[in-house]
């Protein structure tokens, strides 16, 4: 079912901006949640209607009035030590979005999740959606997003279908997330490859993610999660090196041992816990798990059930 009118959270973020472009380009009216004047201006410039509020707004359902589809793309994606605010945004915020959507009569909803719900810091090789979530998440981002996804899928029922989409390493046009950090690290000479960077990784171009979300919203089965990636796996070094080269930056040759970073991350997480954040180290296990080992995903389910094929 293609929505006649769409409500979107996270509309001023990287994914949200591209989703607005995508759906406005399809001729579908979009209402997007905006927390600030700047966010509202961004939403308006992209051709969507801003609705002022946040994930905790009691009247959020009013913004969804008349919308038959929605996409929940807002989240706190910090990969640091985690915070009560992150937990509230990702879990309680998702709960309020679900309550509002049901009250407003939204028929279908896609929750933007992440492959991080499965990460432990160990390699994840060709994982599909049957792979169990770990009992001990690698960090607060993984833990809070896993709880949010489980909450969302458990609320799916006849008349209110909720699907989850799990991308990995989103990249592409107007990237304001990973690429600026990589560019800054490379330009300052601080970027180094972990164990040479030759382990494999899945990735998701922003155009592929928008296409996968569209298919999940239209064709997905309520209560189900779907991995959406570029299909082809890269080595981490080839992927990041290609992004840098496209910006005219020569990728570095420096390398750092994985065991050293793992030791630092484990120690840092322990110190942070014991000192309530007064003592920290510059890397966390949450960040390391994302970028230091193979993480490859099987998209057969999305191909079979949604008809998904990468457009990039």
Image (cartoon, rainbow, N blue to C red):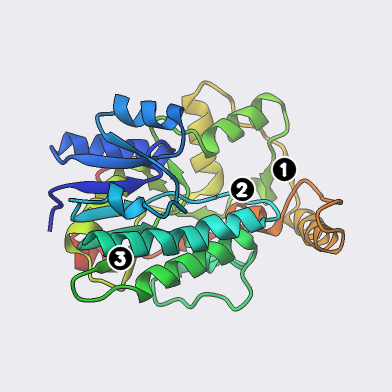
* Sequence-first disc among 3 and 2: 3
Quarter of the image with the C terminus is top left
Outermost residue on the front side: it is 59
Please state which of residues 188 and 280 is positioned toward the viewer in this rendering. Answer: 280
* Sequence-first disc among 1 and 3: 3
Residue 242 drawn above or below residue 220: above
Give me the residue at 63% from left, 61% from top. Answer: 140
Q: Find residue 211 and report its horizontal and vertical position in percent.
A: 25, 48
- Secondary structure at badge 3 equals strand
Residue 55 drawn above or below residue 108: above
Q: Quadrant location of residue 19?
A: top left
Give me the residue at 54% from left, 39% from top. Answer: 178
- Secondary structure at badge 1 equals strand
Q: In this rendering, which labeled residue sits more in front, label 3 or label 2?
A: 3
Q: Which mark is residue 197?
A: 2
Q: Is there CB contact under 8 Å for labels 1 and 2?
A: yes
Can residue 145 be seen in the rendering of this structure?
Answer: yes
Quarter of the image with the N terminus is bottom left
Q: Find residue 50 and report its horizontal and vertical position in percent.
A: 32, 35
Mark 1–mark 2 distance (CA, rounded to whole Å): 8 Å
Q: Find residue 95 and report its horizontal and vertical position in percent.
A: 43, 64
The residue beneath circle 1 is 255
Residue 216 falls left or right of residue 186? left
The residue beneath circle 3 is 163
Q: Is there CB contact under 8 Å for labels 1 and 3?
A: no
- Secondary structure at badge 2 equals helix
């Amino acid at each position: 079912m293609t929505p006649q009118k769409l409500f979107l959270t996270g509309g001023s973020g990287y994914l949200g901006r591209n989703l607005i472009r995508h759906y406005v380009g399809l001729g579908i009216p979009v209402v997007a949640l905006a927390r600030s004047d700047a966010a509202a201006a961004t939403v308006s410039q992209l051709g969507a209607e801003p609705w002022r509020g946040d994930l905790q707004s009691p009247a959020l359902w009013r913004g969804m009035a008349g919308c038959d589809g929605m996409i929940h793309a807002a989240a706190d994606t910090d990969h640091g030590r985690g915070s009560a605010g992150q937990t509230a945004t990702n879990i309680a915020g998702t709960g309020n979005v679900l309550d509002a959507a049901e009250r407003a009569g939204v028929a279908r909803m896609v929750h933007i999740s992440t492959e991080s719900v499965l990460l432990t810091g160990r390699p994840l090789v060709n994982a599909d959606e049957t792979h169990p979530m770990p009992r001990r998440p690698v960090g607060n981002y993984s833990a809070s997003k896993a709880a949010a996804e489980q909450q969302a899928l458990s609320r799916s029922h006849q008349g209110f279908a909720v699907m989850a989409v799990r991308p990995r390493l989103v990249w592409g046009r107007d990237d304001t997330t990973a690429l600026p950090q990589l560019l800054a690290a490379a330009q300052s000479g601080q970027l180094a490859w972990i164990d040479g960077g030759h382990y494999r990784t899945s990735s998701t171009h922003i155009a592929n993610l928008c296409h996968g979300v569209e298919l999940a919203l239209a064709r997905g089965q309520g209560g189900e999660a779907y991995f959406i990636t570029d299909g082809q796996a890269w080595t981490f070094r080839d992927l990041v090196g290609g992004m840098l080269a496209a910006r005219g930056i020569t990728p570095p040759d420096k390398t750092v041992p994985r065991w050293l970073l793992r030791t630092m991350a484990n120690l840092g997480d322990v110190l942070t816990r014991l000192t309530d954040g007064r003592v920290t180290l510059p890397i966390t296990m949450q960040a390391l798990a994302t970028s230091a080992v193979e993480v490859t995903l099987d998209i057969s389910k999305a191909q079979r059930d949604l008809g998904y094929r990468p457009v990039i």
